[in-house]
Amino acid sequence: MNTQYSQYDNQKICSIYDMLIIGKGFLISDMKATGIIAEYNPFHKGHACHIAKTREITGADCVIVVMSGNFVQRGEPAIMDKYARARAALLNGADIVIELASVSAVGSAQYFAAGGVGILKNMQADALCFGSESGDITPFLTASSLLLNRKSELDPLIHKYVKGGSSYPLARSRAIQQDSESTALLSDTKQPVDLAELSNLFCLPNNILGLEYCMEIILQNAAITPFTIKRTDSGYHDTTLHGQFASASAIRNAINANNAAFLDFLPENTHDFIKEYFNCYPPVFINDFSDMIRFELMKMNDMVFDQNQKSSRVADLPEFLQNKLLSHVKDAFSVTQLIEAVKSKDLTYTRISRALLHLLLGITERDYHTLKENPCPYIRVLGLNKTGQAYLAGIKKSLTCPLIVKPADYKEYLSKDIFASDIYNLVLSRKSGCKTVSDYRREIIKEQSI
């Protein structure tokens, strides 16, 4: 993909600090920033609409996108690499794109939210705007406060329902409905939460993340105001192209089927460079990593599970799940076959896929313990425009963690992320027959303000 990138190191960004007024005519110190936490797998028209509405309803001067890298939360690789997806976002309203660390990006909803909110807090974002099936922020605020305030009472109930086979989101919903004081608190507000709709609030995919964002804002004591925009047209799990906005799942299916109609659902200003990207690099899917994952799994065959070494164990891969996977690994020719053979009512496809991705990327229980203690150990910039440059210049001196624009200078921070990119690039180069560029040598994407 022949795109023009421009490297900006800390010194160059700092030099902009002396600017008093930027293109739109406001002082840097007056800039209002709003954050979006996303995967953009791939970036489509619905995402462009979300950015535009986010800027409108929050009055943002600068839109900061915290975006997953080359692997995503459902336990799969991104269909396009992070640089292509970041460029699409910058072409369609984002001012800064920050990479969400791989440990957060491939974690469950609470870890995904913790990393994203942690970055936005450090970036001094005033607001966070997320898409949801609900479209009303009040239930999220009420439910998130309730879950935290009555944690000691609700956790045993949640554990009971999970043990009984319920998914964690459904278990939370059932726990609240069983706890009389919780239901009373939900009803005794200026805008009561409809208990009949509680399972939708807790169990629909975008609502789940929105609830975790609101909880993390409270837990991290972040001065961030949450907003939500109702999703329209295609649902999260829709698999066919239709309507004005197709789901990312439907678009990925179309790309996998070589159906060029997927371009109709992407912003027109991305068509040329995306076609150029796919002419060089084919889309990447989880089965492209089958041999790697099966090899890593078989290496664990003789591992002895030591409770005293729990922190160094692969995250979300308990002994019983490992044994189930090992019993099928030799007969499964792909990751999807392996997951289908193992999944059950209490072991969802996504949970197993995420556990296998943790195995592949070397993500351990210790990594998640560290993440909860420090949700934002660094800020890695993937791309920005002039507005983004000016905003970074204005806040840089008050950041509480390293701002990384040259990965080679921060190897000790980025080891997990660089390894994830190296694994991704191994598959990408094998499938394409083209060389890939190491993260250490990739330059920040620069786009002009729109």
Image: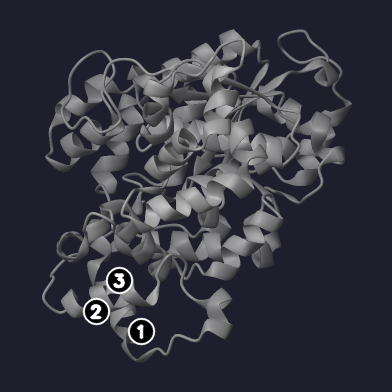
Q: How many marks?
A: 3
Q: Earlier in the sequence, mark 3 or mark 1?
A: 3
Is residue 90 at least partly visible in the picture?
Answer: yes
**Given the image, on which type of amino acid does mark 1 rest?**
Met
Indicate the position of residue 286 as horizontal and vertical percent values: 27, 56
Indicate the position of residue 250 as horizontal and vertical percent values: 21, 32
User: In the image, 249: left or right of 223?
Assistant: left
Secondary structure, mark 3, is helix
Is the residue marked by circle 2 packed among few (<14), some (14-19), or many (20+) residues within 10 Å? some
Q: Which residue is mark 2?
A: 326
Secondary structure, mark 2, is helix
Q: Residue at x 34, y 52 (%)?
A: 77
Per the model, the C-alpha gap separating discs 3 and 1 is 11 Å
Q: Are marks 3 and 1 in contact (CB under 8 Å)?
A: no
Is the residue marked by circle 3 packed among few (<14), some (14-19), or many (20+) residues within 10 Å? many
Indicate the position of residue 343 as horizontal and vertical percent values: 21, 60
Indicate the position of residue 315 as horizontal and vertical percent values: 47, 67
Depth check, mark 3 against mark 1: the one in front is: 1
408 versus 387 height, above or below: below
Q: Residue at x 76, y 16 (%)?
A: 22
Q: Which residue is mark 3?
A: 293
**Given the image, on which type of amino acid does mark 3 rest?**
Ile
**Given the image, on which type of amino acid does mark 2 rest?**
Leu
Locate residue 190: give its quadrant. Answer: top right
